[in-house]
Amino acid sequence: MFTPLVDAQHAKEELKRLTQSSSVSEYVRTFPASVTCIPNMTNNEKRRQFVLGLKKPIRHAMDRADPATLEDAFTVALTESIDFVASVTTSLTTQQQQHSSGQ
């Protein structure tokens, strides 16, 4: 596949601006399309750019997990986002229970 240099450069600039603006699953869904127009981009570069675009709580978890591939990064990010939501939900539930019982 031939990709003109200008298109590839534009795609790189767009990729640098791509960040997680909603859910991790939405970001994982849209990210691969953003790298298809960039020839010779290594898996490490793709993985690094993906991690940089994540919101801070998930990005910190990614730093600890240090996934080896882009696909591993997708899996870790999705798992961490589920764990994060579960912990927030548990915390809110506990707070509501404490509040309703007068503690």
Image (tube, grey):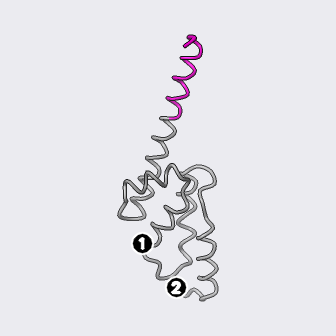
* Residues at discs 2 and 1 in contact (Cβ within 8 Å): no
Is residue 94 found inside the magenta-colored segment of the image? Answer: yes
Which quadrant of the view contains residue 96? top right
**Residue 61 or 32: which is nearer the viewer?**
61
**Residue 73 or 94: which is nearer the viewer?**
94
Image location (x, y in percent) of residue 70: 42, 64
- For mark 1, give the secondary structure: helix
Image location (x, y in percent) of residue 73: 42, 59
Q: Which amino acid does label 2 sit on?
A: Met
Residue pointed to by mark 1: 43
Q: Which residue lies furthest to the front in this view?
A: 103
Residue at 39% over, 59% down: 72
Q: Which of marks 2 and 1 is nearer the N terminus?
A: 2
* Mark closer to the observer (2, 1): 1
Which quadrant of the view contains residue 67? bottom left
Image location (x, y in percent) of residue 52: 52, 63
Residue at 54% over, 72% down: 35
Using a 10 Å C-alpha cutoff, classify the residue at mark 1 as few (fewer than 14 neighbours), some (14 to 19) or many (20 or more): few
Residue at 59% over, 13% down: 100
Which quadrant of the view contains residue 2? bottom right
Q: Residue 1 carries which label?
A: 2
Q: Is residue 90 above or below residue 58?
A: above
Using a 10 Å C-alpha cutoff, classify the residue at mark 2 as few (fewer than 14 neighbours), some (14 to 19) or many (20 or more): few
In three-dimensional space, the C-alpha distance between marks 2 and 1, rounded to whole angstroms, equals 18 Å
Residue 67 left/right relative to 57: left
Magenta stretch: dominant SS?
helix
Span colored in magenta: 88-103
Q: What residue type is labelled 1?
A: Asn
